Amino acid sequence: MPRRTGQQRVSAYDIKKTTSMPPAYEARVGKADVAVFGVLADLEAKCAGILTDADVTGSDRIKYLNFVRAVWSQVRKGTLTNSKKNALVTYFVSQGCDEAVLTQLANAVMGATT
């Protein structure tokens, strides 16, 4: 589960806070879609509950959260198809993830963003 909420992540990138970041970094952050950080943090928190229910612990959680980020990226771009989702599931199963948990996570991501 993320240590910070989505709103806390967004506030860290607020370009009006001159004490939080160097001016050279300000221009690069200004181009980023800062609202996305908050949405992703909230989505990761939601998926962390699914992982806890499935008894996924330790470094295995990283694999599952990487799957969540990959699916969410495709959903956000509007390019997620069934074949792409199945390819991602197949890849992460080959990395040692449980297919049933991956399916739950994919459904949670698609439900959260539609």
Image: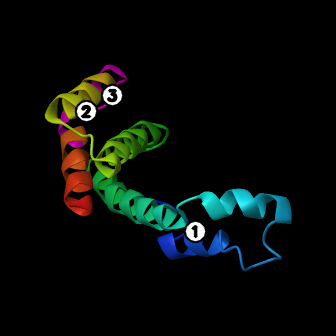
Give the residue type that dot 3 points to: Phe
**103 sits left or right of 74 in the view:** left
> Which one is nearer the viewer's eye here, 96 or 41?
41
Distance Cα–Cα, label 2 vs label 3: 8 Å
What residue do we see at 28% from left, 25% from top? 93
**21 sits left or right of 9 in the view:** right
Q: Secondary structure at mark 3?
A: helix
Of mark 1 and mark 2, the one earlier in the sequence is 1
Residue at numbered disc 1:
9
Distance Cα–Cα, label 1 vs label 2: 30 Å
> Which one is nearer the viewer's eye here, 103 or 15?
15
What residue do we see at 19% from left, 41% from top? 103
Boundaries of the magenta span: 92-101
Residue 89 screen position, x and y as percent: 25, 30
Give the residue type that dot 1 points to: Arg
Label ID, residue 92: 3
Give the residue type that dot 2 points to: Asp
Residue at numbered disc 2:
98
